[in-house]
Image (tube, grey):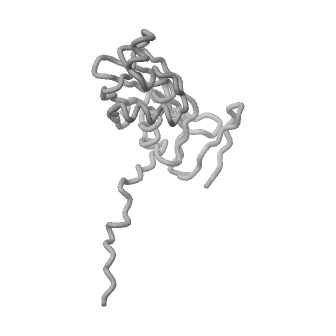
Amino acid sequence: MQAPSLDSTMYMPRWTIPPQVYYEQVNEGDQIPSVDFNLTVQRMIMFVGATRNFPGLHHNDRVAQKQGAAPGMFLQNNSCLMLWERVVSDWMGIYGRVRKSSFRITDFHLAGEIIHVGGTIHRKWQENGLNLVELVMESKSPRRVCMTGTVTVALPSLKYPTTTPMWDREGKATVACQ
């Protein structure tokens, strides 16, 4: 009796690892790849569970309506930032690091909507041995722009492709070669 043969595709990852982006490859004005997120009720409830932020506004339409907060359940602030984090981390690759972000929410990210998240490279500069890139980010619902702001990331260079910065509690960076 012959052993069954293993299909080589059986052990391949289901998705590809995003390519690494290097500082020298980006230019001011470049768009980063955008992602559309379907905010299903299931996804909204998973966000609540993941963040342990349990007010009913974020997972119950009746509570949100009764409190006059929104026409239905809506995404909480840190979950809105999770959408941005997914888009930015997919773009920059595994050796990029988020340094800081700031945002302003102007409308609700409501359950049942498709939220379009994207960004543009606004500025790039070098400071204290870091290759910094500022992205202007935006989240849009079918109704209007819901959230705007910036995300600053540090990217590796082509000369040192696996160099990643690490920040301490005061925001001082050290660069570690891996």
Residue found at x 63% / y 40%? 129
- Please report the residue visible at 39 percent of the width from the left and 15 percent of the height from the top: 107
Residue found farthest to the bottom: 1
Q: Would you place residue 7 above or below residue 74 in this image?
A: below
**Viewport quadrant of the N terminus:** bottom left
Residue at the spot x=49%, y=42% of the render?
23
Q: Is residue 169 left or right of residue 97?
A: right
Looking at this view, is 173 or 53 the one in front? 53
Q: Give how far across and how far down residue 15 sits, in percent.
A: 36, 53
Quarter of the image with the C terminus in it: bottom right
Image position, residue 81 (x, y; %): 48, 29
Vertical order, 93 against 114 (above or below): below
Foreground pick, 48 / 119: 48
Q: Which residue appears at 31% of the width and 26% of the height?
A: 113
Q: Residue furthest top?
A: 68
Q: Which quadrant would residue 120 be assigned to in this image? A: top left
Task: Say whether residue 1 is left or right of residue 136.
Answer: left
The image quadrant that residue 148 belongs to is top left
